[in-house]
Structure formats: C-alpha cells, structure tokens
Image (cartoon, helix red, strand yellow):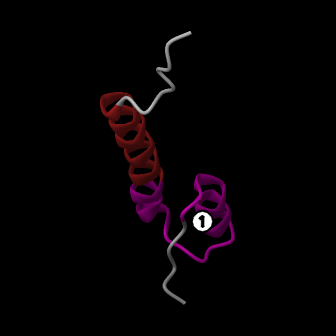
Amino acid sequence: MSGGAFNPAVAVGITVLGLSAVPNLWIFLVANLLGGAVAGVLFNALDLGDDKPQ
C-alpha cells in the first residue's frame, strides 16, 4: 500500500501503530488542514449560494 492517510484520525492511528514514522505525521495533518482551508476560501470566492430574489 502507499501508506497515505487522507483522514487526520487515520494518520494518527497508523503512527501510533508504528506503520508510519512519527516525523511523517505533520505532513498528513498540515495537508488536510490546508486543503480544508483552501476549499473554504474557494467556496466563498465562487459565491455559489442561492441568491434568488424573494
């Protein structure tokens, strides 16, 4: 397997189980947090809300 973890809880779990080295944990956590932040900014920038007049 690739060893990738796309969920911070899974990243912590595989680190605790010894399947991934502790120094690699930061990349899983930072990548997920930055990805979520970028998604939030893009969502707000695209303004996909429902703007129908009432």
- Horizontal and vertical percent position of residue 21: 49, 70
* Towards the viewer: 51 or 30: 51
Q: Residues within 10 Å of mark 1 (few under 14, many from 20)?
A: some
Query: Magenta-highlighted stretch: main secondary structure?
Result: helix
User: In the visual, does 19 lie left or right of 17?
Assistant: left
Question: What's the residue at 46%, 58% (across, down)?
Answer: 28
Q: Residue furthest bottom?
A: 1
Image position of 29 with respect to 42: above or below? below
Image position of 17 with respect to 13: above or below? below
Question: What's the residue at 39%, 53% (across, down)?
Answer: 31
Quarter holding the C terminus is: top right
Image position of 51 with respect to 17: above or below? above
Is 25 a magenta residue?
yes
- Horizontal and vertical percent position of residue 18: 62, 73
Q: Which residues are magenta?
A: 6-28
Residue 39 quadrant: top left
Question: What's the residue at 33%, 38% (across, down)?
Answer: 42
Q: Secondary structure at mark 1?
A: helix
Image position of 15 with respect to 38: above or below? below
- Horizontal and vertical percent position of residue 23: 41, 61
Quarter holding the N terminus is: bottom right
- Horizontal and vertical percent position of residue 26: 42, 53
Question: What's the residue at 50%, 20% (across, down)?
Answer: 52
* Towards the viewer: 6 or 47: 47
User: In the visual, does 37 lie left or right of 20?
Assistant: left
Q: Which residue is mark 1?
A: 15
- For the image shown, how many numbered marks are present on the structure? 1
User: In the visual, does 13 lie left or right of 38?
Assistant: right
Q: What amino acid type should be assigned to the residue bearing mark 1?
A: Thr
Is 18 a magenta residue?
yes
